Image: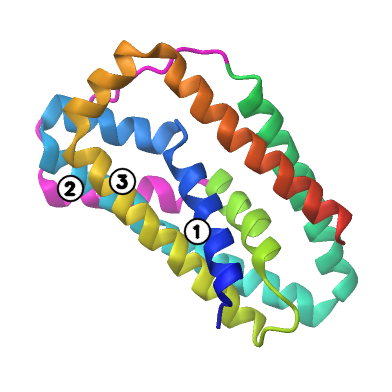
Amino acid sequence: MLTPEQFSGFLLAAMAITVAPGPDNLMVLGIGIAKGRWHGVAFGLGCALGCLTHTALAVLGVSALIAASPTAFAMLKIVGGLYLLWLGVQALRSTARVRVDGKVAGEPSLAGLFWRGMLANAINPKVGLFFISFLPQFVFAGNGSVDMQMAALGLTFTAQSVLIFGLLGFFAGTIGQWINRRPSAGRWLDRFAGAIFVGLGIRLVVST
């Protein structure tokens, strides 16, 4: 369903975006540090699997647009490209020190943290908008079903998120100390992800 170039390009971009400091991964780190590594892993896995909801919505929404109007799909790509450009500029301008302060009240169970992470991700409209903007860029018109390509890309994003968030939760203490000793590390990760956003946004707008 995905060509090697399509898969490798998407995977590299997805991993760079996932490791850049953001609400989800900083919360995973914070919970891992405050409550223990397995609590961080549970919350991280929930956040990652919440991406499946956005994958399904993106597949259904984009497919419906293509069926209804190719022009509307082209407009979606332009708007998505502009949105990615905006995200990229915001990340490039980031100067705030990375903080790891995601504390959870009480002593939630591992299952409770898992479902909390999944729900937090699944109902986040910004994540849904990101998926609708990001996935279509890696869909090749001559590579079979658009639905299947979108689904494969979404599953790939979810799988790498499971790996990265799981590792973040497991090694939360070590990673948190490393970030706190290097305040500029988060800014450089932001800039790296920002450059990817800008590049993808420009490509999406120009290629429409």
Coordinates of residue 128 in the picture (x, y in percent): 56, 53
Residue 112 lies in the magenta-colored region: yes
User: Callout 1: few (<14), some (14-19), or many (20+) C-alpha neighbours within 10 Å?
Assistant: some
Q: Disc count in the image?
A: 3
Amino acid residing under circle 3: Phe
First in sequence: mark 3 vs mark 1: 1
Residue 26: give x, y in percent of width and height.
35, 30
Task: Say which residue label 2 marks.
Answer: 112
Say which amino acid is labelled 2.
Gly
Q: Compared with residue 140, is residue 106 higher up or lower down, i.e. above or below?
A: above
The numbered mark, 2 or 1, whose residue comes first in the sequence reads 1
Q: Is residue 137 above or below residue 147?
A: above
Query: Which mark, by number, is residue 11?
Result: 1
Span highlighted in magenta in the image: 95-124
Does the magenta segment cover residue 91? no
Q: CA distance from mark 2 to mark 1?
A: 30 Å
Identify residue for label 3: 165
Quote the CA–CA distance across marks 2 and 3: 17 Å
Q: CA distance from mark 3 to mark 1?
A: 15 Å
